[in-house]
Structures are given as C-alpha cells and as structure tokens.
Amino acid sequence: MGKHYLDPLFAPESIAVFGASDKPGSVAGRVFQNLREAGFGGRLYPVNPKHETVLGEPCFADLAAIGHSVDMVVVATPAPTVPEIVRAAGENGASVAVVMTAGFGESGSGGRRLERELLEYAHYYGVRVLGPNCLGLMRPRSGVNATFSNSAAEPGNLALVSQSGALCTAILDWARPHHVGFSAMVSLGDAADVDFGDLLDFLALDPHTSSILLYVEGVHNARRFMSGLRIAARMKPVIVVKAGRHAAGSRAAMSHTGALVGGDDVFEAALGRAGAVRADTIDQLFAAAQILAERPRVAGDRLGIITNAGGPGVLATDRAMDVGVAVPELSEATVERLDAALPDHWSRANPLDILGDATPDRYREALAACLADPNLDGVLAMLTPQAMTDPVAAAEAVIGARDGADKPVLACWMGQEQVAPAWQRFLEAQLPYFRSPETAVEAFAYLARHRRNQELLMQVPGPRAYRSEPDVEGARLIIEGALAEHRKVLSEMESKAVLTAFGVPVMASVEVDSASQALVMAESLGFPVAMKINSPDIPHKSDVGGVRLNIDSAQAVRRAYNELLDSVRAQRPDARLNGVLLERMYTNGQGRELLVGVARDAVFGPVVSFGAGGTAVEVMRDRAVALPPLNTFIARRLIAETRISRLLAAYRNLPAVDQDAVEQVLLRVSELVCELPHVTELDINPLMADPGGAWVVDARIGVDSPAPSLEPYGHMAIHPYPAHLGDRFQLADGTDIRIRPIRPEDAEIEQDFVRNLSEESKYFRFMRTLHELTHEMLVRFTQIDYDREMAFIAVTERAGGEQELGVARYTINPDGDSCEFAIVVADDWRGLGIGTRLLRTLMAAAKARGLKVMMGEALANNTDMRALAERLQFTVRTSDEDPGLLELRTEL
C-alpha cells in the first residue's frame, strides 16, 4: 500500500517540456503555457536548443543543461527525435514521459520501428510512457495541465480516461457550464505503454477520485484491462462509454454461436463481470456518475414514481420499460395510507399522480409512503411548475422525507427559471436531481445495473466445478489428433466425445457408411432413430435437408439412408460425404430446444453463450453471453437474461424443466473452455431440456493450436480462482493447517486477523500505526486479481468456521518480471513453521507465474522476518536510503 508507480505522472515535482517555443501554433509551447496558467507549483523547464527563452523563461538546450533530474518529461517534437529524448530522460532519472507526438504505431512500419525503439529505452530505464499521439493529462488539484487543450478542467472528484483526445476537449468544454469538476483527465492516445489497466490501478486508490469515467474505442490487452477494471470497480463506481457498438458487417462462422455473438455483446458481458456500468451518451455518462457517486444502496430495480402531472409520469414509465426498470403496483398498505393523506382523485397506482395543485405536504406524505413500501426499491419524485406549485418548498419536503431513508431518492424538477432555486437546494443536500424524466429513470437504471454487476464482480469461480474430475487429457488427445490431420473442425462424434470427457450428457451417435450398417445399428439402438448426414463440409445439416427424424422401422432406415445421401449429393456435389450419423431419437414431448455455445472474441477470448435453440436460432436471436469461468450464480444469471428462460418454468400443460441440469451443462462447458485453449468455437444446438434432465442432441467444436503462453489460463480475460494452489500440513500437536488463495468472502476473518495482531506485529507489517484495516484496504486485500497478485492465507477449522493464522502476498511490479512480497503470522502461532510454509507456497506460485525475482522490505529490528528470509535463501542487506530498513531479495 505504498506509493504507486504512477505517482510522478499525477504529482510531479518537476517537468521538462521538449519542443517548447513562442512560435504560434506550437504544441509544446501551448503545453508550457497551460502548465504556467494552471499554477503548477513545481519546477518547470522549457527544453529547445533553438530558443533562448520561452514566454520569458530561460530555455534549456537539453536535460544535461538543467543540471538535475526531473520527474516528468513532456515531448512534442518530431517522431524520429522521441526515442533519444526518452533515453536521455531515463539516464537523467525521469520516471514518466508524456509523448504527444504522432507518427508511431499508427503510421506504418517506420512508425512501428520507432515505437519499438522508444519502448525499449523506456523499459530499460524504467520510464513509463503516456501516449504517444495523446493530448496529455490534467490533475487540477496539483496544478498540472500537461495538455495542448484550450480548455482547462475544474477541480472535482471525477476522473476521466479517454482514448480520444478530441473527446476529452469536448467533454471539458461541456463540463465547465455544467459545473462538473475532475480529479484527473488523461488522454491515452496509442497506449503503447501506460494503458487503461495502469490508470485504473492508480485511480482505484486515489483519495481524490470518487468515480471513474472511461471512453473506450478498443482494448489492446484484455487481461490487463479486466484486471484494472475489476480492481477499480471494487473501490468506486466505473462508468464506460464504448465507441463502435455496431459492427459494419457480420463474419461467416461455422457455428450458430459464432454468427450470433458480436464484439459489443462480449464487451457488455466483460463490463458486467468487472462490476462497471455502461452509458451510451456523454449525458448518460455524467448522469450515471452523479447518481453512483453518492453510493446509495439499492436492493433491486423496482421504481416508484411520484408526479404532479400525468404526462411526465407516462414519459418516465415508458423510459423505465425501455431500460429494464420495473414500475410495480403499490402495496395495499401503501394505497390505504395514501388514501388517508391525498385527495380523492389521486391515481391510486404507480406512477403516483398527486395532482397539479400538489402541496409540499403531499410530496412529503407520498415519498414517505413509497419509501416504506416493500414493493419499491427506489423513488423518483417529479415536479412540473404550475400556478399552484412551490418548487422550492416541495424540494425541501422531498429532502426532509429522504433523510434517514435506506432507499435511493431521485428528483426531477422540470423547467428552468422557476425550478432553478430548487435545483440548488438538491445540490446542497446531495440529493441527485435531473432535468428530464428520461434522464432520471436512466440514472436509476444505472443504480440497479451497478448492483447487479457488483454481484457478478464478487463471484470468483475456479476453472472447474469439481463435482467430478473431467478427463482433460483424453479430450486434448482427441483435439490434437484432429489438428495433426490438419482439421480445424471436429466431427460430431469427436465433438460429443470431448463433451462426454467433461461430463456433459449427450445423445450417443454412431457413424455408418452403408444402408446395411445403418439397419444393424438402428436395431441395436432401438426405434425410433434420427439420421444425419456425416460431412466435414456441411456445418448446418438442416440447411441442405441433411436430417431425417422419427425413423421407426427397418424398411424406413434403408430408404432414409439412400434418400438422404442422394438429396445431399444433389444440393452439395462438392461436399465430402462419410455416410451418416445414427442416434436414438429424442422423443420427450415436454422438451425445450436450447443452445449452448462458445465463441472466441478477438479481444476477450472465449465467451459462453446461452439461448433459444433450433433451426431458427439466427432469426430468434435470443441469447445472452458471459465470460468464463462460470459458477452456479453466473450460470443462473446467464439463463435469466434470455426470453426462453421463462419457458423453462412450468406453463400451460408443460412441467418445468430440470434447470439444475441446464446449469450443469453450462458449468461443464465453462470447465472445457478453461482447460482447453484449443477450442475456438463450440455449438450445442439443440440441447434438449425436460423435467428429467438435459441432453446434447447435436454438437460441433472448432479447434486450433493455442498460442504459447507462460501464464496459466492465458487465453482467458478473467483469471479463475486458483483452487489448485496451496498446501495442507499438520502441526506437531495434530492441528490441521490449510494454505489456500484468499477469496472475497474472507474479509471478515482477514479483519479479525489484523485486529488481533499485537501492536508490534502491525507495525512490522504495515510500517505505521494501524488499529484495523480500513474498508478500502480490506477490499484491496481480499478482492484481488489473481493475474497480477497473489495472497495465500493459512487457516484452521474452528467452531463457526475458519480462523486465519497468517497471510503472505505478492504484487507484480510494472516490469512484469519481479514482485514485492509481504508476510505476517498471528502472534500466538509463531515458531510453528507456518511462516515458512506460507512463504514457500508464495515463492512457488510466483515462480510458476513466470516471475524471476521476489523482493521486499522489513524494519531492521524485525529479527523474526530476517531469520525467515535467511532460512529461505533471501539476500538480506541494509537499505542505502534508510538504514532502518532491510532489503530482502531472492532469485526464483
């Protein structure tokens, strides 16, 4: 929890601006001027060998002429000069470089060569690079406006990170008249080095930022993006606007799933798993920020609407239906309560029309009743200025009734002049207010969506459901056999075999290549049977009439076999035909046709989809998607997001299907995706579900050789919970100890563990006085991203659950090769070998992750830590900068 590696970017003590001049239109000159006008309090140096002064300040030929190091360099010189400037900056101790120059990765092979050279120097000297081709950044509270924008940000608590510099300037222009301030504004540009993941990691712990706004055009590194996004969204609201929501065209795919799932679906699913919310417009972006910054608690998506006019109530209800917000009936108790408080002609329904002459008392009574109604999760109070209304007094009534409420209250006072004073009162009372019914309802929708996505964020499933162990090696051998034959699509038999290896129930198929064989196998399977064409060139059999169903006799088998092959040959004379597949006919009239699939997104990797199945799947387009790994909670949420989910329950004369069986199929497919990076597409269509279970009738799997990766589960955007890591051992007195990775639900035992440490142990661990973990620290320590950090806890069983005895953790450094570690063991459990076991487990995990060096710091008088480090072959030396600190280091 020490200083962040991006601190010099947001709070530099000295800045050198390369290319600064007085020449009109000079980008660097504008940057230098903006820094001066923003009141930057540190040392500011213009660097340009062609000028003696810039804006009356002495100009330096290079960094050596300055005579001492600077924290940050801002570069706006021709592209060929930039790598050498970054090299010189690194040699002179600079930590960050803001490169505004274009002409790098976006401009062809020459630009890419320059970019590689730039990054090689940056990585060698440990300089973090923002850009190139960026607008720069602003940090108003630090007097940093290192941009060439004509607009400056007002101080505030919103952070904006954008891939578009032009959009930054537009938002800044919009924000000033709307009195919106910023804690930081960052333009990423090409994001060759510093990207969303780095900035989100910093902003998550930034005390001056309450909400984070992102404008995303594309994601370069899905794992880093998701890692940073999940860390930030655990700490504060993150709202995202994504450009390019609609693809210009669709690609050809061998599966229904591939044809259905698009990049925008996947991005939406990624935001859900990260706990962030999405806005479609800039207005919505700030509406979401306004409501979420207050951090109100909301239990669901049911909204009560109070209005003094019918029209706005209808507009609000219509928009609620559009965005998935429920406007439910009021409870009987609420109606009775309001009957006693309101005039006879009130609407007696939701929306609550309390009539045009509504007094402040009516608003107060209506709001109090709605807040007490168990059918409602939040309330929107609306007012249109009429002759009989007092907007300010009504606002005061709403504010007063809201105090102490455990449900969110939003206001929409429509108009301008007459209601402006009421807006001011809402602002002072920190009650979210909006100027149109639609925007207010959208804001509540963001609250509800944020709650749902935060529930998804808390899920940390492992790669396997662990009900029974899958035959991973057998499935891999089937796939590798197909790849050895230069095939990228498994046959149906092979596909079902792979699914069977992971415990997915299938309708068994047999391959036959003659009418006589078909007859023998049909008699063996039992009538009726289904017959399908067997061809590697025909992905969708029904499209060419390649399926025969309900074949119920021996004579019909022979006839169907010959007719099927003749029909397909006539339609596809070019196709290779390998006979037919024969399987027992699924005959349960209570079954529903479903689809379960996997598609490989170009950015986020494998995606699991679920929806309505059958031959009309592309027309129905009823599907939802989720990023693996899945658990039961995520699988149920995935099913619930589809229209066909309502048909899985009992309706008319059909009983409910076995939804647990459907969930198990989704979990097994998730396991398959996690363990087999070879799978590029999977299509189970149909999956037949009925009261007795779920069975795969047809399946097809696309495969390819996976890209080599040192990272476990490197093909996935979300790192699964590493349940396979850890250790078990027994103390001399027989106490069983388990070492396992930490989970979000460990927050309570982690807090108790730290709270019960001695003051000396707390000081040795945190190097400062600490009574207990703050909420932010507790979230940061227990809701970790297993890709960039790891924490193991040692626990033992006690009455009522587990007791934490020790914890060890590492965090990967920005260089990607080394990590910093920390460890602490409960005072009463020291000297028993727990610390040694914890640290060895941590070192083994770091080595398996591909890290080369583990390092840490300890106070010089922490003799136990010194002894543990030396016992495990760490090099221990006194710090050159602080003799009170020991530096611990080992090669992994």
Image: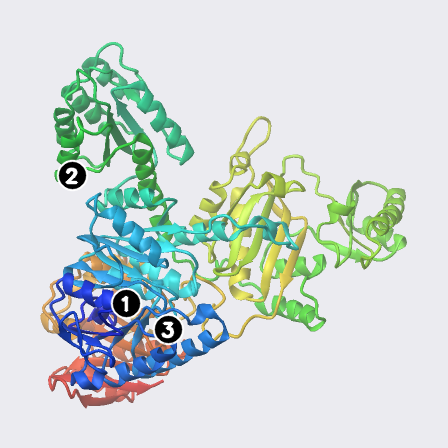
Q: Amino acid at mark 1?
A: Ser
Side (left or right) of 498 relative to 876: right
Question: Which residue is at a point 48% across and 50% down the rendered structure image?
Answer: 264
Label 2 Cα neighbours within 10 Å, binned few <14 / some 14-19 / many ≥20: few
- Would you say residue 50 is visible in this rendering? yes
**Front-lying residue, 36 or 552:** 36
1 and 2 marks in contact (CB < 8 Å)? no
Q: How many neighbours does mark 1 have within 10 angstroms: few (below 14), some (14-19), or many (20 or more)? A: some
Relative to residue 603, is residue 377 drawn left or right? left
Say which quarter of the image contains residue 690: top right
Q: Which of the image's four quarters has the C terminus? A: bottom left
Select label 2 or label 3 by which is in front.
2
Q: Tell me which numbered mark, 2 or 3, is placed earlier along the sequence.
A: 2
Asked whether the residues under the numbered discs 3 and 1 touch, taking CB atoms below 8 Å apart as contact, a structural biologist would say no
Q: Give the Cα separation between the discs numbered 3 and 1.
A: 61 Å
What residue would you read off at disc 1? 26
Examine the image and state in which quarter residue 617 appears.
top right
Q: Amino acid at mark 3?
A: Asp
Say which of 756 and 338 sits in front.
Answer: 338
Tag nearer the camera, 1 or 2 = 1
Of labels 1 and 2, earlier in sequence is 1
Q: CA distance from mark 1 to mark 2?
A: 41 Å
Q: Is residue 92 above or below residue 295?
A: below
489 vs 872: above or below: above
Picture coordinates of residue 847 (x, y %)?
39, 80
**Looking at the picture, does residue 667 appear above or below residue 334?**
below
Res. 427 mark: 2
